[in-house]
Amino acid sequence: MVIPAVAGAAGEAFAPKYGAADAVPLGGTDLRLSRLCLGTGMRGFNRESNHTRMGRKRFTRLLRGAYERGVRTFDSADLYGTHPYIVPALEGIPRDNYQIISKIWYREGGLPERERPDADVVVERFLRELKTDYIDLLLIHCVTDADWPRKMARQMEIIARLKEKGVVRAHGVSVHSLPALRACVTEPWVESVHTRINPYGMSMDGAPEEVVPVIRAIHEAGKGVVGMKVVGAGKLRHDAERRAASVRFSLGLGCVDVLNVGCESLEELDDMAGMIQRVPRPVGGRLS
């Protein structure tokens, strides 16, 4: 159970610990995401993932259960094939009560077809698959080159126009290399970054001592930061002690806004929520 907010001495609400259901501002965007975001792309590739492979009934139970526990943000991607599952799983819940993240794949391989249409064409399909009028956060998926802003300039311009139309509420990238991460610091188009973070360097863009200063710089530049691979791409699934240490490390940095975790059961989600709840909030820039 998430710790509720309580009244402070001055009547100001505060929570002594983090909570999975905290509504977190995402950088300079208008979005507020839940502290814990449910990822749907575990072992995701070629429009399949562990989440699609569990079948609609179990997937729906997972998403509904997450929502009932206060999770309001759901991470998807074309690569994962989970678009058709999400909104139907949340049927009856007002669309503005939750946030959908999705990602466009422009790399070779990974999708059944070879063509990579422009972002406006792709997003139109996404909206049909998701059965929604807008995507809260749209990312260019898996950028790795230091000069990705130059290579993706056309798509970035199209996505910016989609934001002007209200089809996309915010945009950014998911990053899979240190040079690409560094490019996010000064790229004005980037409003939010999905970046891999844990204290062990598992499935990351470099050692924590290399990656953390870049994440700090991104956050200080007013951009949102969503941490992924907090469970080491599943390597820590059966190691509760190191999993808890990873959650504490990631939130304790003070520059990771949201944890995106591909829980595959409500038991895993409850476990992650409990670990988040045990992390003390910073007081005076330090952990209490």
Image (spheres, rainbow, N blue to C red):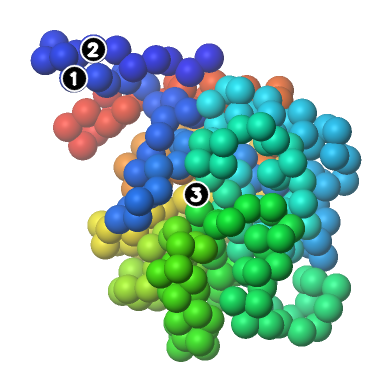
Question: Residue 193 location in percent, x, y?
Answer: 45, 60
State the residue at coordinates (82%, 65%): 46
For marks 2 and 3, give the CA distance: 29 Å
The part of the image, by quadrant, that contains residue 80 is bottom right
Question: Residue 288 location in percent, x, y?
Answer: 27, 24
Indicate which disc residue 227 carries. Answer: 3
SS type, badge 3: strand
Taking depth in this image into account, of 249 and 262 the one nearest to the observer is 262
State the residue at coordinates (37%, 22%): 17
- Return the residue at label 1: 12
SS type, badge 2: strand
Do the residues under discs 1 and 2 have CB atoms within 8 angstroms?
A: yes
Q: For mark 3, does the 10 Å Cα neighbourhood hold few (<14), some (14 to 19), or many (20 or more) residues?
A: many
Q: Amino acid at mark 2?
A: Ala
Do the residues under discs 2 and 3 have CB atoms within 8 angstroms?
A: no
SS type, badge 1: loop
Say which label, 1 or 3, has the lower sequence index. Answer: 1
Question: Residue 274 location in percent, x, y?
Answer: 54, 21
Q: Nearer the observer, disc 2 or disc 3?
A: 2
Question: Residue 98 location in percent, x, y?
Answer: 54, 39
Q: From what the image shows, is residue 261 above or below residue 266?
A: below
Q: For mark 2, does the 10 Å Cα neighbourhood hold few (<14), some (14 to 19), or many (20 or more) residues?
A: few
- Return the residue at label 2: 7
Say which label, 1 or 2, has the lower sequence index. Answer: 2
Say which label, 2 or 3, has the lower sequence index. Answer: 2
Taking depth in this image into account, of 229 and 166 the one nearest to the observer is 166
